[in-house]
Image: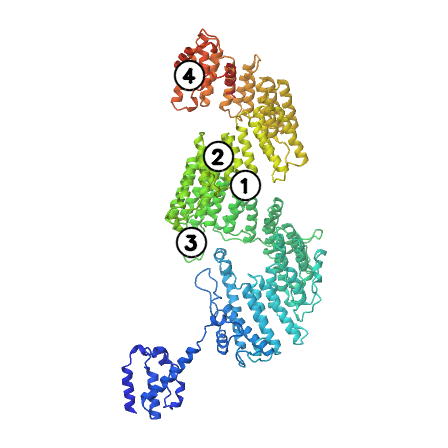
Amino acid sequence: QVARFLSAALLLLMTPISSLNMQYHFHRRLPPQIQSFQRQNRVEAVDSILFPNGLPTMALGATVEAHCVASSNDITTEDAFGKMSQVVRNDKARNNDDTRLSIQQILKQPIGSLDHQSITTLCNSVRFVPNANCQSKKYQTPNVNSKGSSLWCLKVLERILSEIIFWEEAKKSDRQTSSNHQTIYLKSIHVFSVLTTLSHDIRNHKNHRKKLNYWQKNQISRSDQKLMNASDIQCLKNVVCALYQLHNSRNGNDGPTWEGSCFSQDVPSFATMIAAEASKTEKSGVDAALFFLDIMNRMTRDAGRKVEEEDPRLIGAVLNGLAQWGRAEEAQILLGRTLGVEISMANKKLSAIQSLDHDVTCPRKLTQSQAGPCYDAVLRAWSKCALLTQQQIQPNTIKFDEQSDKSVKKRLAPVDAMSQALHILLTQMPPEQISNRSCSAVLQGYGALGMGKEAEDALLKIEWMLKSPLEEGPIASSSLDVACYNSILHGYCKASKREDMHSAVKLFQAMKTETPIEINTGSSFFVIPPMPDIISYASLLNCYGKLGMASEAEKLINSMMSVGTTTRKPLETDPPEPTIACYISTMQAFENSFDRDAPARALALLQRLESIGQDSENKRDKRSRRSNRMPNRIIYNYALRCMSKHGRGEEAEKILNMFNKAHPNCNGPDIYAYALALRAWERVGKINPKMAAERAEKLFIEMKNLSSEGYLPPLELSSYNTLLGIFARAGLAYKAECLLHELEVSKSSEWNQVESFRAPEPNQMSYNLVIKAISRSNEKNSVTVERAWNILYRLGYPKKGDTSRTPMQLSIDTLNSMLKLLSKRGLAAEAESLLNAMDDFIVEGRLKRNIAALLSSYEATLEALGRCKTIDAAKRAEELVTRMEVVGELGGEFQPSLLAYNTLLNCYANAGMAGKSEALLERINQMHEAGRIPSPPDIVSFGSTIKAIANSGKSQENAVARAEALAKSVGHGNEVIYALRLKLLAKWGLGEEAERLLAKMKEEYGSGNLKNGPSVVHYTCVLNAWAKSDDENAVSRAEALFRSMTENNEIDLDLAAYHGMMLNYSLRGQVEKAETFLFDDIMAAHKPNRNSFTMLIDAYARCSSKDVGEKAMKTLNKMRELHAAGNKELAPDDVTYASVIRCKMKNGKLSSIRDMTEFEKFLMMRELQIESWPFRHQESYLEASVVDRTK
C-alpha cells in the first residue's frame, strides 16, 4: 500500500499544472479513514477542465480517492480509476440532458410550466435581497431595477405566486400538472425579505432626493426621479392580492407549497407604507395604498374583532399621499371613517360630499390624541385641491372600495376649498391638536392662491380662537410663528397688485416694529406679531420686484446690507443679512422699473456687491466654513436682464467684463449671459441703429471665437436672429445677407457633422429679417428687390414660367415680408402678382393657411397701391377691398379690417376722389354700428378724407367747410387733423385763417384737450399759407412767425421750415432777402439741398433786374462746386435748369420758351452742359412743380 501510494504521488508530479482545478481541491476534503468503494457516489461531478482531451486524467483529490478505493477493495488502481470515471461520465451526461435555466429564462416560461428545480431557483433568488445603496456619483438615484434588486425580486415573487396559484386552480379542477407538488417552496422569509428591502430602498430614495438641490434635481430625468412607476405599483398589488388569496383559501394554515405565515397583518401594512411613499412621484400609489387599507379592514372583520386601534403612521402616510395630489374629498372621508366621526362641510356647495359612504363602518379606529398630523394632512389636501382647481386641473377621484362605485367628480372653486380647510381648522379639529404646522397648512394655501387679504382674515380668526382664556390684558403675544405671517406676505406678493402691496408693507412694518394688531374688530384685543425673518424680507423684496418698485427695494436691501458691514454686535431688531434671493428680487425690481436711472442703480448695486465680496474674501478666516460673498452667476444674469430690457448695451458689456473677472477659469459668462447683452444692443438699435449694429457685431464675433475655442457651446439660432434683427433695423442689407449665407453654407459643410462645430439652420424668421433689412436699406434701385426675390427662389418659390409644383419651404410671414418690401418701394403690380400667387398656393395645398397673416398680406398690397403713382391705383385698390368683402360674405374667415379701409381712403386721397372718400367714411361708420367691423373710423380715416378734399378740385369755400365739418365730427382735437386742415388752407393761400387755426390749437393744448402742442409741421404749413397769400403784409407776418419759431425752445426747426420762409421771398422775387436767408441762415443751421438753391434761382427769375442771368449761372456753378465737394443732395435737376433758362431769357429777345428754335435750344443746352431739354411740359406745370418741391 505504501508503494502504491508513492506511485500515485509520482503520478501527481507528472500531471500537467493546467489540468488541476485548484478551487475543486480547496473545497473538497477526503475523510481521514479509508472509505469503501460503495461510497464512491459521494464524488462530485468532475468539471470538463479535468478532462481536457477526454482522457481520465484526475486531479489531486480524485487520484488519492481512487488509490484509497483500490486498497480497500483489493483491486488495481486502474480499475478503481475506470469505475470512478464512468460515474463522472454518467453524471455529466445526465447534466447535459437536464441543463439548468437562468432566472431570466425561467421568468420567460409560461405560467404552469415550471418544475421543482425552477421554482426552487426562484425562491432561493429572493431569499436574501441586498439593499440598493446610493452610488458615488452625484445626481444618481439608487439602482433598484437591476438584477437582484428589490423591484426585480418583487417581480420574481409575483411569478412564484402566479405559479403556485396556477397549481391550486389546477388541483381544484382535477387537471394534471407536470408533477405532484407537495414541497413547501414559498416561506415567510421570501416574502418579508422582499418587502423589507423595498421599504428600505424607498426611504433611501427619499433621503437621497432631499440631499439634491434644485439644479441637481433637474439633471435627473423624470423616469429616474420615480422609484416605482405604475407597473411596479401594480406588481405590488398583485403580490399582496395573491398572498391574500392563498391566505383565505387555507384559513391562514400551511398549504401544500407555501407556509401559512407568508401572509399576516404586516404584509398589507408594509405594502401601504411602500405605496404611500411611492405616491409622492406616482399617482397610482395613492390608489394602491387605499386598496391595502381596505384589505387590512377586511382582515380585521374576518378575524371577528369589532374595533382595533389603527396605526397613525399608516393613516398619516396615506393622507399625505392624498394631499400630494389634492384629493381632499377622499382624505376627509378617510379621516372621518378612521376617527368614527362625521366632519361637517362649510357650505351647501360641498354638501354632496357628505353622502359618500359615511355609513360604512371601519373596524380600525384612530384615537383623537393621535390624529393631529392626520388633520394636518387633510388641511394640506384642501389647500392643494384649491391650487389645482385654480390651475384648471381636476384631481382624479378614486374609489375607496372596489365594491363601491361612488366617486367625487364635482369640481370645486378655490375659495370653497379653502373655506372648507379653514372650517375644519376652526370648528372640527380639537384645539389641543392645533399646531403651527396646522395653521401653516391653511395659510400657505391662501398664499399660493395669491389671496393675501383672505389669508390675513384667516390668521386673525385663528389668533382669536387660540387666545388663551388666562390672558387678562388687551395685548398678548401671537400664538403663531413667523412662518404663518410669511404665508400672508407670500399671498400679497402672488397677487401682484398695488393695493395688496400696501397691505403687505403695513403687515411687514407691524412685524418689524412689533406693533400690536387688532385681531377682532370691536373686541379691543391685540396681538404682537413675531419679528420678521429672512423669508419675510425676501417675500417683501419679491413684491417690490414684481411691481417694479425699485426705490423701495433698493432702500430695503441697503438696510439689510448695512448690518453685515458694521463691526458692532448685531441686535435682535437688526434685519438679517441678504441672501441670493434678496439680491435677485432687487435686480428684478430694477428690471421692471420705469425709472430711467434704474440700470445705473442696478450696476452700482452690483459693483457694491463685488467690493463687499472682495473685502470679505480678504478678511475671511481660512478655517471658517463661510464662503466669499462675491455675486454668483444668477445675480450677474439678472443684472444683464435689466440692461437688456432697458436697452443699455454699454452697461451690459461692462457687466460681462465684471462677470469674467469675478469668475475666471472658464466659470465666467455662459451663452445665456452673452445672449442678454446682444439683446440689449437690439433695444439700443431703436434709438441709434448704426452704432448698435456695429457694437453688436463685435460682440457676436467674440461669442463665435469663444465658441470655437470651447469656452461656450455652439451658438443657437436665436443669437443669429438677434443680430439679423439689429442689421434689419439699421438697414444693413449686405451684412444681413452675408450672415444668412454663413448659416446656409455651414449647413452643408464638413465641420457641421461634428456636434461641437454644428451651426444652426436658418428658419423662416431668419429669411424674414433679411428681407426686412433689404426693405430698410437706402438702396432704392431694382437690384435690391431682385436680391429679395432670389431669397424666395432659394426657398422654393417658382420662377416665372416654372409650372412644376415642387415643395416650398415658405410661410405666409416670409411672403408678407416681401410684400412689405414691394409696398415700401411702391411696386404695386409685383405685390398684386405675389398676392394672387399666394392664393393659388393655398388652394393647391403648398402653403399653409393662416387667416391673420393672410389679412396682413392684403393690407400690405393695399399699401403698395397707396404708394403707387399710377392713375388706376385707386381703382385697383377698390377692387381688392371688394374682393375681400366678397370672400367674407361667402363664408370666408376674414373681413376687411379698418386698416384696409384706411389704406383705400389713402388711395382715394392721392387721386383726389373726395366724393368716394366721404362715401366710404360713412359706410365704415355704418358697418361698425351693424357690428361688421369692431372699430369705428379713427383719426386716420378722417385725415385721409380731409386729404382727399384738399387734393380734389372742389372750390375753396366748399373744401374748407367740409374739412371743418369732418374735424368737428371727430369729437376731439388731434394733431394730424390740424396738420391736414392747415395744409388745405396753405393750398389756397389763406394765411390769416391758418394762423387763427394755429392759435386755436395752442389754446386746446393749453387747456389739456390735446396731447401734444403745435409742432414744426404745423408752423411750416402756416408759413406756406403766407407764401401763397395775396396779403400785402404776408412777408412781414411770415417773418414774425418764423422769429417766434426760432425763439421757441420746444420747436426743433428742420430744413422744411426754412424752405417755408424761403418760399415767401422766392415767390415775390425778393432777391436780397432770399440770398441773405440762404447763405446766412440756412447754411448756418442745415446743409442745403437742391430745392434751397432752386428757390433762389426762381427768385431771380421773378425779379425785375437785368443781370439775373449771370447771378443764376453763378448760383448754378456754386451748386456744382458743392456737389463735387461731396454734397450729393445738390445735384441740379430739370427744375433747376428750367429756372436758370428762365433767368437767362430775361435779357433775350424772345418772350416765351415756346418761341425758341431748335438751334437756340441747342446753344442753351451746350452753355448749361446738359444733354436733354428740361421743358417737357407746359410752363404752368413747371411753375406748379417748383412750388410743390418746396412742400
Task: Indicate the position of residue 73 as horizontal and vertical percent values.
Answer: 35, 92
Q: Name the residue beneath numbered marker 4.
A: 1116
Q: Amino acid at mark 1?
A: Ile
Mark closest to the chain's N terminus, 3 or 1: 3
Which residue was labeled with disc 1? 842
How far apart, in angstroms, are the residues tagged by discs 1 and 2? 39 Å
Q: CA distance from mark 4 to mark 3?
A: 79 Å
**Which element type, helix, strand or loop, lies under badge 1?**
helix
**Residues marked 4 and 2 touching at CB (< 8 Å):** no
Contact between labelled residues 3 and 4, with CB atoms less than 8 Å apart? no
Residue ranking furthest to the bottom: 74
Say the numbered circle drawn on residue 687. 2
Judged by depth in the image, the label closer to the viewer, 1 or 2, is 1
Residue type indicated by callout 3: Arg
Q: Which mark is residue 620?
A: 3
Q: Tell me what residue is drawn at x 48 percent, y 48 percent.
A: 635
At label 1, counting other C-alpha atoms closer than 10 Å, the crowd grade (few under 14, some 14-19, many 20 or more) is some
Please report the residue visible at 57 percent of the width from the left and 27 percent of the height from the top. Answer: 874
